[in-house]
Amino acid sequence: LHREMAATVLALIGADASSATTELVEALGDKSDFVRANVATALAQMDGQAVHVIPVYGEFLNSEDPNLRTMAVMNLGVLDPQEATPLIDDLIGMLESDDPTILKPVVQLLGNIGPKAGQSLEKIKELETGDNPELQTAVNVAVIQIEAESDPDEGPGLLNDAEDDSATE
């Protein structure tokens, strides 16, 4: 119980708990998923700790516990999206959900990953968004981001293509 309370407090403190980084990384191996989830939440808010939390989030994405899956999806959004690329297959699996509160952040994260998440494109396009305009917007934006040119010097492909067309006319 004390471990769980301490982990909760550290998750709330977030990046300000960086003086306890070593202990937090060790606590990622705790037997309690609750402790591990809160420790991962705290570490995700600290620079340079993604390497430690990505494997934990990957495990939670495949958990039977819907709360752990939701927590992992939400907290992955805090990280640099490129750090989540090892979890693309797990995120694609999450697209099977019919819960918009899970689908929206998964779609947003895959979109933010960009062209590297190309294998998710068909599943994203096939999502039933129903009467959920927020999910529909997330799907539309993700499709554009994933289909975008991958050259960071060129920026968004749509804008540059339009500029290129007008320059040749």
Image: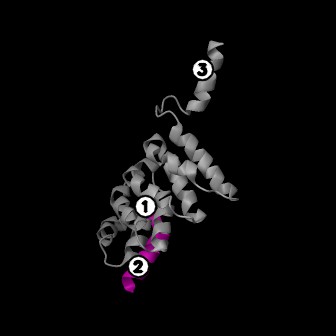
Residue behind mark 1? 44
Disc on the earlier residue, 3 or 1: 1
Mark 3 to mark 2 CA distance (whole Å): 56 Å
Instruction: Say what secondary structure mark 3 lies in.
Output: helix
Applied colour scheme: one colour
Q: Which amino acid does label 3 sit on?
A: Asp
Does 5 lie within the magenta span?
Answer: yes
Disc 1 vs disc 2: Cβ atoms closer than 8 Å? no
Residue behind mark 3? 164
Instruction: Say what secondary structure mark 2 lies in.
Output: helix
Q: Which amino acid does label 1 sit on?
A: Ala
Residue located 36% across and 52% down the image: 86
Disc on the earlier residue, 3 or 2: 2
Nearer to us in this view, 79 or 106: 106
Q: Give the range drawn in magenta.
A: 1-18
Disc 3 vs disc 2: Cβ atoms closer than 8 Å? no
Residue 40 position, x and y percent, is 40, 66
Residue behind mark 2? 6
Mark 3 to mark 1 CA distance (whole Å): 40 Å
Determine whether, in the image, residue 73 is placed left or right of residue 58. right
Residue 127 position, x and y percent, is 58, 54
> Which of the 4 image quadrants contains residue 55?
bottom left
Nearer to us in this view, 82 or 9: 82
Residue located 59% across and 25% down the image: 161
Badge 2, how many Cα within 10 Å: few under 14, some, many 20+? Answer: some
Determine whether, in the image, residue 40 is placed left or right of residue 155. left
Residue located 70% across and 59% down the image: 131
The rendered magenta stretch, by its main secondary structure, is classed as helix
Residue located 40% across and 70% down the image: 63
* Residue 69 visible, this orientation: yes
> Which of the 4 image quadrants contains residue 7?
bottom left
